[in-house]
Amino acid sequence: MRDVTELSRAFGVNAEWGEGGKFPRFFEHVCGKRILVLADPNTRPLGEELICALAANGCSVGELVYPESEPVADERTVERAVRRAEGSDYLLAVGAGTLNDIAKYAGFLLKKPSGVFATAPSMDGYTSGVTPLIEGGAKVTRPAQVASDVLMDADVLAAAPSLMRGAGVGDVLAKHCALADWRISVSITGEGYNAEAAALMQEAVTRCEVAVPALAAGRREGVGPLMDALLVSGYAMVMAGNSRPASGAEHHMSHFLEMDYLRRGLPIPLHGVKVGLGTLVSLYLYRRACTLPRLEGYECVRREAERLPTVEHAEGILRSLSCPVRFSEIGISEEAMREMLRRAYLIRDRFTILALYCSVGAIEEVMDEVVERFY
Ligand SMILES: [Zn+2]
């Protein structure tokens, strides 16, 4: 596979591995600048060495540490970042999903570069050019900028909680189904395909899976292939011109559930955790399609089913990283899961295995068995 640091450079991203807060390439281009660090009480201590090193390298460093231990990327947190960053030249998130989203979006609004010191390999938004936000209590996706710098320390990433490493792997396993959904859409609806983007994504997924035992044991050699896959996901999307290489029915299921949490005013479980569960359902639907008379004749689906990993394989991986493998484990009602199976495909006008089941009326035929297997 192409070296991901080199590949990142081609996409304008400095993806830099360092230790003890030392990132020479990053320091070179922020030297003398005013940097605003965004963190929360959990991530701030992890950024200590980096913050000291920035000051020692001629930067003036301001800090915005959100008081909540799990801030949400919404109007309020973005507004705080924008207000504090007005006198800064660069926004640096010390965190993962949410803090990276806030920094990317606030930087985009202020037309100032942003970057992230990644504290967990938990999702693929580091190199994505859009950002999910909560506005008026609803989830929306806004254009944002890609992080200019993604700073990674293998010791910090390997020490992230097992569930966060698992969430990252869940978001990577999802690519198997996302790519399969893309290809069946090419066959069934005539949608365009980008073989180079798909191959790049697939290769990164395969390499990441090899690293699962090391990740499960919290060893540092596991985090390289996982971070590579999470970064490549963003580049594959840029190459494809859409999110097809990274997101299919399993992401639609995750988004559908998110709205349920928002309606109930409950904290939303990690993106990759929900996506991992959606991936298990998608894998099951592909396999099951081969024996369902209503889906006879869809050769492309059968072809994909044969190349996809088994549900048991994916389940074993998620379980080894302390991730839930049943929807009842994440506080969703059985009814919400049924609604998800019936309606998640409506979230986006995009053909997937779930859209196929729903459009031919096959979802009710498998509803009870899917709920029994995964609720
Ligand atoms: Zn994702």
Image (spheres, rainbow, N blue to C red):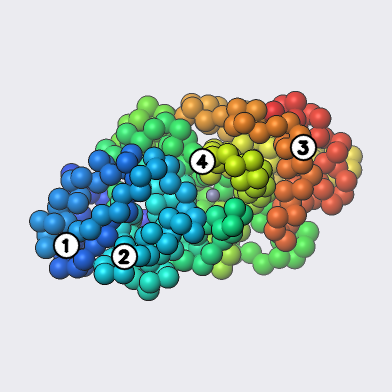
Looking at the image, is mark 2 or mark 1 earlier in the sequence?
1
Say few, some or many: other residues with alpha carbon within 10 Å of mark 2 (under 14 / 14 to 19 / 20 or more). Answer: many
- Mark in the foreground, 3 or 2: 2
Please give left or right for residue 258 compared with residue 25 in the image. right
Q: Is residue 12 above or below residue 255?
A: below
**Of the numbered discs in the image, which one, if any, rests on residue 89?**
none
Looking at the image, is mark 1 or mark 4 earlier in the sequence?
1
**Amino acid type, mark 1:** Ser
Looking at the image, is mark 4 or mark 3 earlier in the sequence?
4
- The residue that appears at 32% across and 41% down in the rendered structure is 41
Q: Is mark 1 within 8 Å of ligand 1?
A: no
Q: What separation in Å lies between label 4 and label 3 (alpha carbons)?
A: 21 Å
Q: Which residue is mark 1?
A: 60
**Amino acid type, mark 3:** Arg
**Amino acid type, mark 4:** Leu
Say few, some or many: other residues with alpha carbon within 10 Å of mark 1 (under 14 / 14 to 19 / 20 or more). Answer: some
Residue 89 or 145: which is nearer the viewer?
89
Q: Which residue is mark 3?
A: 338
Q: Which residue is mark 2?
A: 85
Please give left or right for residue 4 compared with residue 55 in the image. right
Q: What separation in Å lies between label 2 and label 1 (alpha carbons)?
A: 13 Å
Q: What separation in Å lies between label 3 and label 2 (alpha carbons)?
A: 44 Å
Looking at the image, is mark 3 or mark 1 earlier in the sequence?
1
Mark 1 near mark 4, Cβ–Cβ under 8 Å?
no
- The residue that appears at 16% across and 56% down in the rendered structure is 54
**Of the numbered discs in the image, which one, if any, rests on residue 270?**
4
- Mark in the foreground, 3 or 1: 1
Q: What separation in Å lies between label 3 and label 1 (alpha carbons)?
A: 53 Å
